[in-house]
């Protein structure tokens, strides 16, 4: 084996979340009443298109989560030596992007650097010109052929992408047909009702999905064909490809958005329903805690906690065998700190809902049977607040991705060596100030974040609508 | 007399094509009241909303015409329609507390209507607003116009709604269940007000209701609606003398009452079909016991029988052929199952439940330090006894503490003082673990079957919960067997135990709720208005079920209700409650036939009777006082017609009229010495 798998702390948490997600989906599939709102989500074109976009981001993030250390060629007394650099599967897939670093800034699709440099030619004369890039457009003999070459490569890539996309769609539809046929042949259980046991996509939704898939396939194809020869989104100060940076930032954003919920959820759920159901002094204590917590400016609180953690990490270098694991621990702690400060909103929401639920007659019926409080909480209250949790988690996700960017900009975010939208934006502070302006790093971070957060928000909206009993009353009664 | 409103062939449907209102025609004469009668989900409200073109999203009118005072409503432009709404035709809704804007004073809301439709402004409008409030019988109207809706009681709010409706001087008033949310005594006041207003202004009234009693009091013409059709239309006298359509007949037969005490009610099986589910044939076929093949194949035509009377039923179509059948319909066969109730009655035994001087007080806290500044005396010294296998009805208006009493008996609310003994065991002050042992003896059936079942649990899980909590019923197989038996007992199929509550109708849900309580074999069921959220036909099913369960299992019931007809049908003994105290107690016969307490007398006389045999109405003024601030002495004194000096001084002691009949009133203390 010429590599050693590495599981960082954040990787472990992502795998945990993934397992929870898979278990949740399996649990929901077996319960008709839980499946019903998801069917409605499936019928919304916006939701499905944003889910498609989101899942692309997730795939990138997931590939970037599978870490390993490559074996070095030389051995140390028969024992294998591993590189101190931690790479991910994603890094391996896009190796040219990662390794083809230029000297410094270059504009998107450029063949020369962004600034003039003095070079001496064979005769010893000093020339001042834009030097050619080491990798970007290096195959071109004449720099003036660039436009034609770029166009040609883009078209070829897009057509390739379209073909792949279509093949994929054909494969999926034939698989689906077989699945539907299989579902029909198996007698449906008592739970599945008149509207058919299977997810039925409306033609409108299906068409939207089809079009989006093809557009995305063409886009990916074009970029994939261009990327080995050019820097599609330019390079940054140390010559790193901005496209690579943006793609790497996705994982950071996703981890902040999802792992933080691991911290918020138990706190908010436990304290919220305990306060709402038990009332009395429990309620008072919990209310005081979250009122105090939410009245401290959160950036201040986070900054204090992050600085403390930073000092601790720096005084104990022996804890970490690679720099990646150090940066990673800092990321995990950032999630923890963000989680500790952002559970109050959900907690308050859950307390209010529980206050309402505890007066419901089915709770009183359970009390009349002498059912214990813990059992009432788990059997009656938690299932009935689940929709609120789900909605607020999906809504919080985008806010957290943005929060990371803000914190890194302020300087209390992730480790400076970790690639994230925040660090990219932070670097852009100087780039925007120089003349001529370097705009592409900021634009790339902006664009990627916009698409990610927009997709998450649209999806969250669709989820909320699907779970809102007031919007779906007619369906419920009919 | 001309017709003010003429509706013909009105059709309203959902966007998916399901017809909510299907081919309805009727007309209302000037100054008359037309009542649309039917159960929930029959399309009554949608008919009214169609007329005012106020249909909710997703519902569209697709056909028919409506002439209001010679103007075709459906041809009007939207801006002209606005003059009709609130102007020519006004509407009042069911829930007065939701129909008034909470951040505007009552006066402002009335002036708004006046400015729109009468073009009155400033002091003139203010003046007129006060006049209107005065007209609807709001005392001290000049002060009330400045008040906000939350300062008014439910009955007052409905009066304000009526005043607002009258502000536009409408020719037609549409009243959608105007008294359903109100107590009996307040309902009597509001109905009287509507009648007086109609007599004074000569407007017509379209009254939408499910209550046959209200129809009997108010209507000139009646249209009976079922699943979007008007199935029968007649004048009140004709309808009440001889209902023709099987559905109407069943509605009458399903009414509980003293006359039907010892026989099961003629319940209509099933419930109103969902909208648009039946497209062929008569919609009542599945629930009709006179249906034959033709009924499910062909939709019956509207048959006019005599002047002003029509029916939509194959029994009356082609009278030549079916003439004979209509004859024998007149006396519909009553179920002749006579229960062995009387034998149960005679077997008297010691009391199952003994309640002594029970008090439930809620502290009122005020100020920074949450000091207790007063007490809401929700239940203030109640004593009662329920023997084995008997039903005690607890009657009273909303807010009198009935439900609090029920929950205090179950120890869901800790009583402040007094004792509750079940089978001789004291329940108050027990530790949670000791109380759990006694829990099985007493259970509660709640009012709202939609709120009393956890939507996320299957029927089997719901039924098993009590057994699991009280650790009875053996292992899980034994419990499943018990669940099957329970479902049989309450008349549900066994396979329903794998379904979720949302798949059931209101009546079926209430059956599940009853089965849940029976799972732990209780001796006493506290039924808190178990039928008030249900339609008449379904109510009959549940009452029959409760009655047969009592005979089978020798259960005792504490039946909390405001519906006196149900009391007459079901109860052996009656307690009348007013402001946390029991004012009169006795057997059902004694209390309902010869009520002694002025409050009981007023309550009984306020109930609308379908036979029209109007007992002389005792009009109660005002509303029940707040239990936080009860009047000195007898709490009923401020509303009582026989108030004396002593009433205001102290609470009257108990006076016995017979061994079982006890009254708390000074009127009788004197007489009996």
Image (spheres, rainbow, N blue to C red):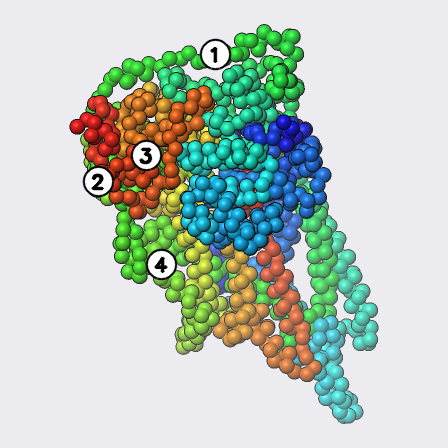
| Picture coordinates of residue B331, whole percent (x, y) | 50, 11
Indicate the chain on which mark 2 is placed: B
In the rendered structure, the answer to whether residue B523 lies left or right of residue B146 reads left
Secondary structure beneath label 2: loop
Report the Cα–Cα distance between label 2 and label 4: 47 Å
Horizontal side of A34 relative to A304 (left or right) equals right
Element at label 4: helix
Q: Taking B614 as reference, is A412 above or below it?
A: below
Whether pointer 3 and pointer 1 mark residues with C-beta atoms closer than 8 Å, the reply is: no
| Residue at image location 68% in from the left, 44% down from the top | B80
* Secondary structure category for the residue under label 1: loop
Q: Of the residues under marks 2 and 1, which one precedes in the sequence?
A: 1
Q: Residue B650, which numbered label?
A: 2
Mark 1 = which residue? B333
- Spatial CA distance of label 2 from label 1 is 54 Å
Q: Are marks 2 and 1 in contact (CB under 8 Å)?
A: no
Do residues under tags 2 and 4 come within 8 Å of each other at their CB atoms? no
Q: Residue at x 53, y 47 (%)?
A: B128
Q: Nearer the viewer, residue A130 or B314?
A: B314
Percent x, y for residue B11?
Answer: 66, 31
Q: For the point 26% across and 43% down, which residue is it?
A: B632
Mark 2, Cα crowd under 10 Å, few <14 / some 14-19 / many 20+, is few
Q: Quadrant of residue B528?
A: top left
Q: What is the chain identity of the residue bearing mark 3?
A: B
Q: Is residue B488 visible?
A: no
Circles 2 and 3 on the same subunit: yes
């Amino acid at each position: 084996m010429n590599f050693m798998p590495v599981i960082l702390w954040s990787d472990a948490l992502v795998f945990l979340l993934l397992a929870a997600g898979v278990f949740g989906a399996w649990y929901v599939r077996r319960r008709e009443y839980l499946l019903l709102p998801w069917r409605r989500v499936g019928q919304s074109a916006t939701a499905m298109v944003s889910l498609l976009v989101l899942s692309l981001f997730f795939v990138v993030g997931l590939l970037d989560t599978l870490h390993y250390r490559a074996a070095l060629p030389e051995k140390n007394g028969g024992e294998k030596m591993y590189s101190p650099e931690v790479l991910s599967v994603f890094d391996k897939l896009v190796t040219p992007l990662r390794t083809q670093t230029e000297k410094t800034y270059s504009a998107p699709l450029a063949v020369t650097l962004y600034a003039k440099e003095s070079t001496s030619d064979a005769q010893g004369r000093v020339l001042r010109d834009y030097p050619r890039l080491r990798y970007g457009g290096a195959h071109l003999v004449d720099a003036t052929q660039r436009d034609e070459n770029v166009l040609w490569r883009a078209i070829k890539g897009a057509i390739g992408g379209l073909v792949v996309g279509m093949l994929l769609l054909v494969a999926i539809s034939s698989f689906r047909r077989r699945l539907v046929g299989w579902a029909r042949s198996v007698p449906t259980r008592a739970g599945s009702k008149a509207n058919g046991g299977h997810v039925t996509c409306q033609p409108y939704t299906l068409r939207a999905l089809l079009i989006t898939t093809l557009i995305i396939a063409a886009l990916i194809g074009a970029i994939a064909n261009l990327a080995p020869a050019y820097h599609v989104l330019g390079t940054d100060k140390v010559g790193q490809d901005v496209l690579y940076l943006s793609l790497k930032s996705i994982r950071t954003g996703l981890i902040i958005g999802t792992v933080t919920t691991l911290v918020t959820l138990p706190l908010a759920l436990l304290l919220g329903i305990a306060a709402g159901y038990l009332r009395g002094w429990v309620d008072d204590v919990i209310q005081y805690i979250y009122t105090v917590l939410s009245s401290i400016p959160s950036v201040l609180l986070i900054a204090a906690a992050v600085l403390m953690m930073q000092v601790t990490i720096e005084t104990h270098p022996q804890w970490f065998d690679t720099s990646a694991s150090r940066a990673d621990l800092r990321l995990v702690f950032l999630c923890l700190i963000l989680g500790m400060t952002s559970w109050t909103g959900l907690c308050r929401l859950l307390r209010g809902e529980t206050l309402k639920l505890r007066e419901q007659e089915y709770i009183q019926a359970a009390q009349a049977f002498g059912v214990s409080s813990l059992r009432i909480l788990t059997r009656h209250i938690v299932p009935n607040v689940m929709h609120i949790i789900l909605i607020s988690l999906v809504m919080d996700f985008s806010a957290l991705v943005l929060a990371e960017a803000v914190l890194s900009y302020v300087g209390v975010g992730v480790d400076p060596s970790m690639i994230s939208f925040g660090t990219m934006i932070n670097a852009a502070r100087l780039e925007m100030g120089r003349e001529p302006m370097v705009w592409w790093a900021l634009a790339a971070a902006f664009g990627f974040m916009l698409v990610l957060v927009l997709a998450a928000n649209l999806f969250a909206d669709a989820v909320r609508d699907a779970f809102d009993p007031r919007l779906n009353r007619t369906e419920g009664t009919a | 007399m001309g017709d003010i409103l003429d509706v013909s062939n009105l059709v309203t449907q959902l966007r998916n094509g399901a017809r909510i209102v299907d081919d309805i025609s009727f007309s209302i004469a000037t100054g008359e009241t037309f009542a649309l009668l039917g159960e929930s989900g029959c399309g009554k409200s949608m008919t009214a909303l169609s007329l005012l073109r106020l249909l909710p999203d997703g519902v569209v009118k697709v056909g028919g015409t409506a002439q209001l005072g010679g103007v075709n409503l459906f041809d009007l432009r939207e801006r002209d329609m606005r003059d009709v709404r609130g102007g020519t035709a006004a509407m009042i809704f069911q829930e007065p507390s939701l129909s008034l804007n909470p951040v505007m004073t009552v006066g402002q809301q009335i002036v708004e209507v006046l400015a729109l439709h009468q073009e009155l402004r400033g002091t003139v409008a203010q003046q007129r607003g006060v006049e209107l409030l005065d007209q609807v019988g709001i005392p001290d109207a000049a002060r009330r116009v400045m008040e906000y809706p939350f300062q008014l009681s439910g009955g007052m709010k409905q009066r304000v709604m009526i005043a607002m409706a009258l502000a536009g001087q409408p020719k037609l008033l549409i009243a959608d269940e105007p008294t359903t949310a109100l107590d009996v005594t307040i309902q009597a006041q509001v109905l009287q007000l509507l009648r007086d207003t109609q007599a004074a202004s000569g407007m017509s009234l379209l009254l939408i209701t499910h209550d046959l009693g209200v129809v009997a009091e108010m209507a000139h013409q009646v249209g009976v609606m079922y699943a979007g059709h008007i199935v029968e239309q007649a004048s009140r006298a004709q309808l009440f003398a001889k209902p023709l359509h099987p559905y109407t007949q069943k509605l009458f037969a399903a009414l509980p009452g003293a006359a039907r005490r010892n026989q099961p009610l003629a319940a209509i099986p099933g419930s109103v079909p969902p909208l648009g589910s039946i497209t062929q044939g008569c919609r009542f076929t599945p629930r009709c016991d006179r249906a034959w093949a033709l009924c499910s194949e062909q939709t019956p035509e509207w048959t006019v029988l005599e002047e002003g009377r029509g029916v939509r039923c194959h029994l009356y179509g082609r009278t030549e052929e079916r003439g004979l059948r209509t004859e024998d319909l007149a006396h519909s066969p009553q179920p002749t199952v006579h229960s062995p109730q009387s034998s149960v009655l005679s077997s008297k035994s010691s009391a199952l439940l003994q309640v002594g001087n029970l008090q439930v007080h809620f502290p009122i806290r005020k100020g920074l330090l949450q000091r207790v500044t007063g007490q809401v005396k929700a239940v203030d010294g109640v004593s009662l006894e329920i023997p084995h296998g008997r039903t005690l009805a607890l009657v009273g208006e909303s807010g009198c503490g009935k439900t609090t009493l029920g929950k205090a008996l179950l120890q869901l609310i800790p009583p402040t003082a007094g004792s509750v003994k079940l089978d001789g065991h004291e329940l108050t002050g027990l530790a949670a673990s000791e109380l759990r042992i006694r829990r099985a003896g007493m259970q509660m059936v709640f009012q709202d079957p939609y709120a009393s079942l956890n939507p996320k649990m299957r029927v089997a899980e719901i039924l098993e919960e009590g057994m699991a909590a009280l650790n009875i019923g053996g292992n899980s197989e034994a419990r499943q067997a018990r669940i099957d038996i329970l479902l049989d007992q309450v008349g549900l199929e066994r396979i329903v135990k794998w379904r979720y509550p949302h798949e059931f109708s209101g009546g079926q849900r209430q059956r599940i709720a009853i089965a849940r309580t029976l799972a732990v074999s209780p001796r006493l069921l506290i039924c808190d208005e178990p039928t008030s959220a249900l339609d008449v036909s379904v109510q009959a099913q549940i009452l029959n079920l409760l009655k047969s369960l009592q005979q089978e299992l020798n259960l005792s019931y504490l039946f909390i209700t405001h519906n006196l007809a149900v009391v007459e049908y079901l109860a052996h003994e009656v307690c009348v409650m007013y402001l946390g105290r029991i004012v009169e107690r006795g057997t059902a016969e004694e209390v309902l036939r010869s009520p002694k307490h002025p409050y009981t007398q007023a309550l009984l006389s306020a109930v609308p009777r379908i036979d029209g045999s109007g007992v002389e109405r005792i009009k109660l003024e005002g509303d029940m006082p707040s239990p936080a601030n009860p009047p000195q002495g007898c709490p009923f004194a401020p509303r009582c017609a026989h108030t004396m000096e002593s009433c205001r001084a102290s609470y009257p002691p108990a006076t016995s009229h017979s061994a079982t009949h006890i009254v708390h009133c000074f009127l009788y203390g004197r007489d009996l010495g």
